[in-house]
Image: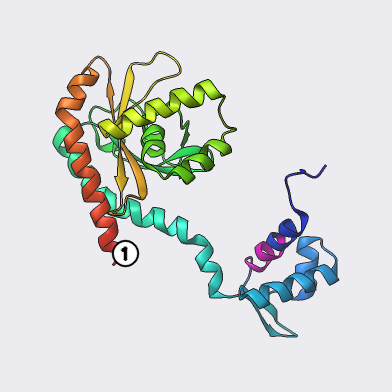
């Protein structure tokens, strides 16, 4: 049964795009067979993709190919690579100096996604790097830091993606995020008792736009939250600024 959320013309367009991406050039016969779509439909979609600049017709014999314009669809993926490249030396230096593992994350669809970690470099790490792992937004330090410092429009979009919140929970979240913005950092609130805790700060561009969330993980038995704030918040905020500056330098 077709998912009612799927818009059929859009699905068909992506089916043709994906089929085109499988080889340097594809004939109409090949595209029709791979997509399972009627020949007239494939022709119409190809004409649309050509008009938009995403495909080109090579010849009757060779068929069609994608153009360089499709590379623009991967900008966000390439940004993550640039972000990680910029962050690695700064994060490694912090862990080498202070031992604690760090985690860098960006927002995915309905989750905060770990992009890089120094857990493998840390003698004090009690969990894996978790690369590309999706973490909850509302109770993790990484997610809370992002929600607190992203734009109002982005925050509303994120909350819609996770299904929204009842009025009382929304009010509690608003109060929490106001406190995080005031303090400049967020702590994890585990759903179940755990020995590990995390503190996170935002990594932002000069214009305030969020680039990432940066967290440090540690056993609760090692330090109180007050001690962590006193000893590491300013260091983490400085580190976040260094990462943001390196990202900006790469882009210029």
Can residue 132 be spotted in the picture? yes
Decide which of 101, 201 is in the foreground and name it: 201
Residue 19 is covered by the magenta coloring: yes
Give the color scheme: rainbow, by chain, secondary structure or one colour.
rainbow
**Residues drawn in magenta:** 15-21
Q: Quadrant of the N terminus?
A: top right
Can residue 30 be spotted in the picture? no
Residue 167 is covered by the magenta coloring: no
| Residue that carries the numbered disc 1 in the rendered image | 251
Which type of secondary structure does the marked residue at label 1 adopt? Answer: helix
Number of marks in the image?
Answer: 1
Point 20% across, 26% down: residue = 229
Point 85% across, 71% down: residue = 40
Residue 248 placement (x, y as % from top left): 28, 59
Decide which of 132, 227 is in the foreground and name it: 227
Point 17% across, 36% down: residue = 234
């Amino acid at each position: 049964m077709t998912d009612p959320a799927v818009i059929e013309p859009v699905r068909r367009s992506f089916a043709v795009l994906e089929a085109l991406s499988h080889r340097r050039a594809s004939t109409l016969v090949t595209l029709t067979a791979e997509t399972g779509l009627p020949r007239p439909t494939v022709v119409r979609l190809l004409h649309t993709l050509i008009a938009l600049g995403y495909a080109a017709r090579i010849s009757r014999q060779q068929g069609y190919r994608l153009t360089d314009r499709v590379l623009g669809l991967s900008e966000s993926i390439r940004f993550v690579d640039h972000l990680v490249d910029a962050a690695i030396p700064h994060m490694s230096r912090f862990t080498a100096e202070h031992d604690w593992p760090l985690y860098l994350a960006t927002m995915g669809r309905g989750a905060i996604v770990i992009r890089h970690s120094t857990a493998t470099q840390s003698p004090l790490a009690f969990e894996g790097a978790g690369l590309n792992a999706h973490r909850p937004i509302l109770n993790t330090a990484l997610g809370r830091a992002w929600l607190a410092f992203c734009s109002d429009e982005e925050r509303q979009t994120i909350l819609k993606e996770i299904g929204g919140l009842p009025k009382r929970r929304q009010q509690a979240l608003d109060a929490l995020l106001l406190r995080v913005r005031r303090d400049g950092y967020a702590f994890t609130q585990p759903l179940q008792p755990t020995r590990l805790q995390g503190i996170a700060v935002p990594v932002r561009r000069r214009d305030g736009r969020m680039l990432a969330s940066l967290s440090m993980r540690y056993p609760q038995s090692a330090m109180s939250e007050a001690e962590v704030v006193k000893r590491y918040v300013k260091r983490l905020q400085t580190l976040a600024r260094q990462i943001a500056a390196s990202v900006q330098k790469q882009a210029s």
